[in-house]
Amino acid sequence: MTEAPRTMNMIQAINSAIDVAMGRDDRIVVLGEDVGYFGGVFKATEGLQKRYGKTRVFDTPISECGIIGVAVGMATYGLRPVPEIQFADYIYPALDQLVSEAARLRYRSAGEYTAPITVRTPFGGGIFGGQTHSQSPEGIFTHVAGLKTVIPSNPYDAKGLLIAAIEDNDPVIFFEPKRIYNGPFDGHYDRPVQPWSKFAESAVPEGYYTVQLGKARVVREGNDVTVLAYGTMVHVAHSVIEETGIDAELIDLRTLVPLDIETVVESVRKTGRCMVVHEATKTSGFGAELSALVQEHCFHWLEAPVQRVTGWDTPYPHSLEWAYFPGPVRLTEAFKRVMQD
Amino acid sequence: MTGRNLPPLSLHVPEPAFRPGDTVDFADFDMPVAGAVRRPPVDAGPAELRDMPYAMVRVLDDEGRAQGPWDPRLAPETLLKILRSMALTRAFDERLYRAQRQGKTSFYMKCTGEEATSVGAAHALDYDDMCFPSYRQQGLLIARDWPIVDMINQIYSNRADRLKGRQMPIMYSVRQASFFSISGNLTTQYPQAVGWAMASAARGDTRIAAAWCGEGSTAEGDFHSALTFAAVYRAPVILNVINNQWAISSFSGFAGAEATTFAARAIGYGIAGLRVDGNDALAVYAATQWAADRARNNHGPTLIEHFTYRAEGHSTSDDPTKYRSAEEGGKWPLGDPIARLKKHVVGLGIWDEERQAAMDLEVAELVKAAQKEAEKNGILQDGLKQSFDSMFEDVFEEMPWHLKEQSVQMHDERKAAGI
């Protein structure tokens, strides 16, 4: 089915993923605020209602609890809902339906009922969204048994991972790094944004393909330090690595649960140093889990403490966005710390 | 605070009419006359139904006679089947309550006094209509003839428990009987039922969904999300509120009962709402049938408030004598649902006291035999019955590395400890 690739940005790749999946399986339905007629505030679902009709792609009331609760019920019926939460900051009203219901339904019913839903939600800052349009709540979901957490960093992966998530029989939270919807972001907010069309990852096949969940991608090989990142931070880290000339190995985790521990461990044992980068607040963030795992699996290979580069433990401030964002300055300092021992 | 010539504000905190030791007097209870409420056509629009949530649909009068337009005119065998399902539900509750007191299980919840609200409804639904129950709807499974032994296995978390000992007692899940897995998080099943019904409608199916929650949990956000979605998409769903007056120790006033009825919540959402005598099996049946007809013919959802009384404690962990008058249950103006239906069928000449006594004995023996059968598979106090590996199963469809690792670790720990 795979056809010649065409250049897509991440929004187009996500749209294409849903389109391809819906065309293959009529059980797939899309629901969320503004996703139908309007095609989503970010245009991720544009054209889908026209193609698949109002009973498969439809707008919902502004009720995240309702959106996810209804999706769980639809999944129980036998459909495969792909609900959208317009911004990850608004996922909290749906938390109980995700954490207590979707995540545990298979377990509590010993497999009688399952909730194969894929919750799409844009997350992360860097778009002047203030503290209500910028958060990175992925750590909350990685803490919950029964949920899978997926975060793409480029158009090709976004499409392949999303199709894999929709086909997965477990509930998946699919976080979309909205800062890089239209092009990669190197952390230098004062530079013009480069469109995805200039990068190889924008070559996206029109048809069906998947990127396996639970497999990380080695973005760049290196020998001195392993950098673990996902989403927007893959690009920021990549840019800083190039600028500083450090021989770092950069790993794009792609899925946090299930995590590709083998790739992480293999790399850290080779480099002897590790740095974790994410945009979410530091305390109890996923970086803490990664640091602990690296300690558990690679302690005897480590030559320096694992460094965490994260957002601060504050809400995301509108006017001080770039002081909050873990950009080149914070990464460069962390590289110095991790390399000095 | 000072310098403003205004009366001080005061906070209203609801208080139930009777507390322990109080003499109970229901003289002020507005007892609606059986048969007096109109039965609107099933295609009536919500605007034509606005009086219904403030009335109360009742069929059986004090003499046990069926009255008025809501009389479902059921065949004798159906009436007797409903009566037997309710008697079996009560016998089941009696026996399993005792089993908890004997230490055979950790927990139990009776539905005494509320049997009609699930049994009556179950009989008015099709077997493949999907039920999203709360934790006091064991009557649904019993009315659907689900094996009692299977229910007791679940309560005992024994080796035959299909749920692998993961759920608290009474948190059944029976896909075969279209009975959804029960959640302890209140009213989460409400939007799920609406979603199921929306899916059924979107697929051009003919099945409908029904959900149950208590009046206390109508205060949860999920309740209101569900009603919004049900109204917006005209979902073919029946949303039942069991108003049994008490949410553990909080009386219905804390869920808003002083200001309005629970059925009247429907009006604000533009959906049909009915208030029903929940201790009248025929009224419950008729209301459910009416709502099911509406749903099946694409006239949308119905919210039904079943006005009833929780005759026993909230659960085996509760002592209702600490917060409500001991007289309350006995003086409940709407009586006992089983006694009322029995009076009705006796009055029809299709039943008598002797047959009732024989049936009571028969269902008690049936539960006793089922309990013995279930106990062959173990009781809770026998210790762990599930395989240790089962702990890590069903978290995901396929077990990821970290769960495999933890499973191995658990086995190693136990081995090292000599267990």
Image (cartoon, rainbow, N blue to C red):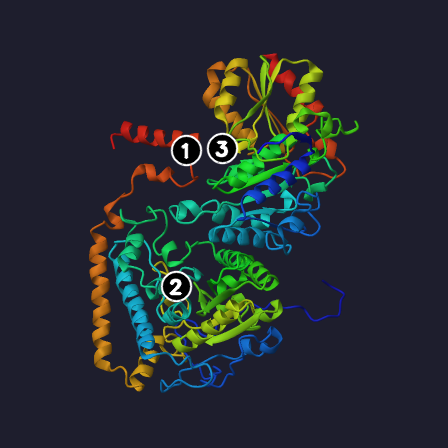
Q: Tag 1: residue type?
A: Leu
Question: Which subunit holds the residue at mark 3?
Answer: A
Q: What is the CA distance from the residue labelled 1 to the residue labelled 3?
A: 10 Å
x, y percent for residue A271: 55, 14
Task: Identify the element where label 2 is drawn.
Answer: loop
Residue at point 40%, 58% (across, down): B178
Question: Which subunit holds the residue at mark 2?
Answer: B
Q: Quadrant of the N terminus of chain B?
A: bottom right
- Label 2: which residue? B127
Give above or below for B116 relative to A225.
below
Seen from the viewer's position, the closer of residues A231 and A89 is A231
Give above or below for B98 relative to A171.
below
Reading the chain from its start, which is encountered first: label 1 or label 2? 2
Q: How many marks do you count on the picture?
A: 3
Is residue A137 shown to the viewer in this render? Answer: no
- Label 1: which residue? B403
Please determine if labels 2 and 3 lie on a single subunit.
no
**Is the residue under label 2 in contact with that under label 1 (CB below 8 Å)?**
no
User: In the rendered view, does B251 fall on the left or right side of A208?
Assistant: left
Question: Quadrant of residue A249 in the image?
Answer: top right
Q: Tag 3: residue type?
A: Pro
Question: Which subunit holds the residue at mark 1?
Answer: B
Q: Tag 2: residue type?
A: Tyr
Mark 3 surroundings within 10 Å by alpha-carbon count, few (fewer than 14), some (14 through 19), many (20 or more)? many
Q: What is the CA distance from the residue labelled 1 to the residue labelled 2?
A: 38 Å
Please determine if labels 1 and 2 lie on a single subunit.
yes
Task: Identify the element where label 3 is drawn.
Answer: loop
x, y percent for residue A220: 61, 18
Mark 2 surroundings within 10 Å by alpha-carbon count, few (fewer than 14), some (14 through 19), many (20 or more)? some
- Label 3: which residue? A258
Seen from the viewer's position, the closer of residues B370 and A308 is B370
Task: Identify the element where label 1 is drawn.
Answer: helix
